[in-house]
Image: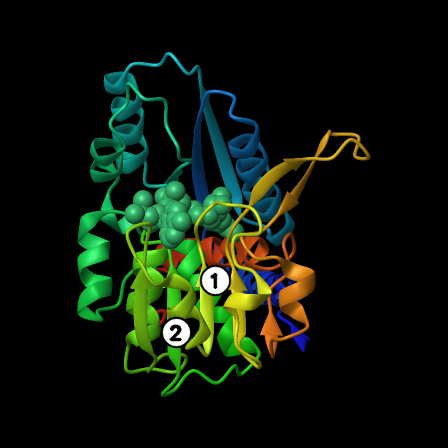
């Protein structure tokens, strides 16, 4: 069994991007600038945004963090996004999700200029992705594809079972894995909470992508020998031995499943760091006007 080490691959991608920033500076060109919007005090969102901002600094990008109270009106939030859209110094905009219930996420995403939508959630970019056109690929699915590519994980002709059909993970992963590309060329089964025979499908899978949000959901009896396991889940479970009072686990029962599979992503240290690396790649592409990744 080989661990798909997201920390290691993301560090390599960040080092490449840092070199590109050095080149831009040497040519007297502006460095990429990411604007992140955080609404409220959701602890997980705080952590995610903090690591995105920190990663920007590490590789020489500029970043701007806009923080708003959770009671912010939708209009005020949209006005701020419009200002970022119009600001030529800002290359990429990300709005950390989830947003408070009184704010319509769809309206917010649709307000971001598609050419600055480095999370790849705007319908224009989703449409381009589905059509196989150059665009921003949503960061988590893009990170997963970069990881499979880095480790030369065989995907052609394989049966991939994706568990979870969210717009940000499951659905785009299923599209990317089924593309005529490398990685890609899988036969994909996209499953969700209404799938009656999930265990049976998983047992047929050469590749399982688990994006459910339930700790240890995928157990060893659901996995065939030699399968590839990509665990997207990030779940906080109570752990009195930790200072924080919790620890992070994935959607996969790691220790038992790892014994059976050929490749597996750990949590933490798997898909999480790859998501940030992919976001940074998208931001670079936004800054230099190339949206050719994954095509
Ligand atoms: N590593 C990263 O960078 C990263 C990035 C994004 C998300 N995540 C994590 O990934 C997990 C999933 O996130 P998400 O945003 O995709 O979640 P989500 O929007 O809540 O979607 C969860 C999906 O799981 C499906 N599901 C729930 N129970 C199921 C069951 N018993 N059997 C089969 N499918 C079931 C749901 O089906 P229905 O559609 O039928 O409800 C839904 O499609 C979370 O733990 C999240 O924190 C990690």
Q: Residue furthest right?
A: 241
Q: Earlier in the sequence, mark 1 or mark 2?
A: 1
Q: Is mark 2 within 8 Å of ligand 1?
A: no
SS assignment at label 2: strand
Residue 24 versus residue 252: which sits nearer the camera? Answer: 252
Q: Quadrant of residue 70?
A: top left
Vertical placement of residue 13 versus 250, above or below: below
SS assignment at label 1: helix
Vertical placement of residue 129 versus 214, above or below: below
Q: Which residue is mark 2?
A: 160
Q: Position of residue 116 (x, y in %)?
A: 31, 47
Q: Residue furthest bottom?
A: 157
Residue 273 versus residue 240: which sits nearer the camera? Answer: 240
Q: Residue at x 64, y 49 (%)?
A: 58
| Residue 49 visible here | yes
Q: Is mark 1 within 8 Å of ligand 1?
A: yes
Q: Residue at x 24, y 27 (%)?
A: 104
Tell me how far mark 1 sits from mark 2, CA to CA.
17 Å
Q: Are marks 1 and 2 in contact (CB under 8 Å)?
A: no
Side (left or right) of 290 relative to 143: left
Q: Residues within 10 Å of mark 1 (few under 14, many from 20)?
A: many
Side (left or right) of 2 relative to 133: right
Q: Which residue is mark 1?
A: 143
Q: Position of residue 21 (x, y in %)?
A: 54, 59
Q: Residue at x 52, y 52 (%)?
A: 217
Vertical placement of residue 204 versus 243, above or below: below
Q: Quadrant of residue 274?
A: bottom right
Side (left or right) of 254 relative to 145: right
Residue 279 versus residue 157: which sits nearer the camera? Answer: 157
């Amino acid at each position: 069994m080989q661990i798909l080490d997201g920390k290691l691959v993301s560090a390599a991608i960040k080092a490449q991007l840092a070199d590109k920033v050095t080149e831009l500076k040497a040519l007297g060109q502006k460095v990429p600038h990411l604007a992140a919007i955080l609404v409220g005090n959701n602890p997980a969102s705080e952590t995610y945004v903090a690591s995105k901002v920190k990663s920007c600094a590490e590789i020489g990008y500029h970043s701007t963090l806009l923080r708003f109270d959770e009671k912010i009106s939708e209009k005020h939030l949209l006005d701020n996004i419009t200002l970022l859209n119009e600001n030529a110094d800002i290359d990429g905009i990300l709005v950390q999700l989830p947003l408070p219930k009184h704010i319509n996420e769809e309206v917010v995403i649709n307000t971001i200029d598609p050419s600055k939508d480095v999370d790849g959630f705007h319908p224009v970019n989703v449409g381009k992705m589905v059509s196989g056109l150059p665009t921003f690929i949503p960061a988590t699915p893009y990170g997963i594809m970069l990881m499979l590519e880095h480790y030369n994980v065989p995907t052609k002709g394989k049966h991939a079972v994706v568990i979870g059909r969210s717009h940000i993970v499951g659905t785009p992963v299923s599209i990317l894995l089924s593309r005529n590309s490398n990685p890609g060329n899988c036969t994909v089964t996209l499953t969700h909470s209404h799938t009656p025979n999930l265990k049976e499908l998983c047992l047929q899978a050469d590749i399982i992508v688990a994006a459910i949000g339930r700790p240890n959901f995928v157990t060893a009896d659901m996995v065939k020998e030699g399968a590839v396991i990509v665990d997207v889940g990030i779940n906080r479970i109570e752990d009195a031995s930790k200072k924080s009072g919790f620890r992070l686990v994935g959607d996969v029962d790691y220790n038992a499943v790892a014994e059976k599979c050929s490749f597996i992503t750990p949590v933490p240290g798997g898909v999480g760091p790859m998501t940030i690396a992919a976001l940074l790649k998208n931001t670079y592409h936004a800054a230099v006007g190339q949206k050719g990744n994954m095509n």
